[in-house]
Image (cartoon, rainbow, N blue to C red):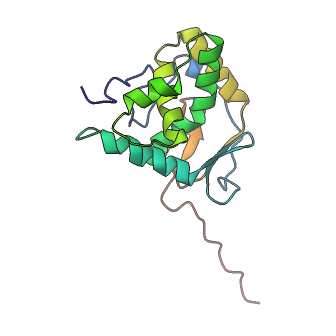
Amino acid sequence: MAPLQHLRTPLGRIGTSRLVFPGALLLGATLALSGCGAQQSGAAAIVNDTVISDRDVQTVSAEVNRIEEGGQKLSSSDALLSLILAPYVLAEARRAGKTVSASQARKVIAKVADPSPSTITFVQMQLAVQQLDDASKSSIVDELGKAKITVNPRYGTFNATSIAITPTAPNWIKATAPSPVK
């Protein structure tokens, strides 16, 4: 078994772009998203006032992919989605008494010599969500529905209903038409 192969979760397998919480469609949670994406340089996303940096997203993706020999690679968008979900999943896991320690996460990614804090958080989230029941997941969806999540269009758009990041059209920067000459 590959080191992360067992990280199949009720949200889906690492590396899939359509992770879905049960009950998300029933809640119909919607978020106000900025059409311009993240408002801070170097930000992949801003969740409430917390910045998730491009560097963290790229580091998580690279470190996880380093140990996924021959398996499906973790995309940057999927890494970002997990980092967006992590504080909500980890808080719910604490509340439910199902925390996952950093040392447990390090054992799963033992092939990574010195994993970044973001990679540890990513793995903790993936392990914790497997332990949560549907009521806990619904609570997470409720909290996500209250959050202000702004994603850099480079990664896509956060969809609160399906709990996914959907790709943005490649030409997300709109050219303005020149003013007519008078």
Vertical placement of residue 57 versus 39, above or below: above
Where residue 70 appears, as percent x and y from the top left, is 22, 41
Q: Is residue 73 visible?
A: no
- Front-most of residues 97 and 80: 97
Res 169 visible: yes
Q: How many marks?
A: 0
23 w.r.t. 85: above or below:
above
Quadrant of the image occupied by residue 138: top right
Figure quadrant of the N terminus: top left
Residue for point 34% across, 30% down: 4
Q: Residue at x 55, y 53 (%)?
A: 54
Q: Is residue 99 left or right of residue 38?
A: left
Q: In the rendered view, would you say 7 is above or below 36? A: above
**Percent x, y of residue 173:** 58, 64
Q: Position of residue 76 (x, y in %)?
A: 45, 47
Residue shown at the point (65%, 75%) measured from the top left: 177
> Which quadrant of the figure contains the C terminus?
bottom right
Q: Position of residue 83 (x, y in %)?
A: 56, 37
Q: Residue at x 75, y 42 (%)?
A: 49
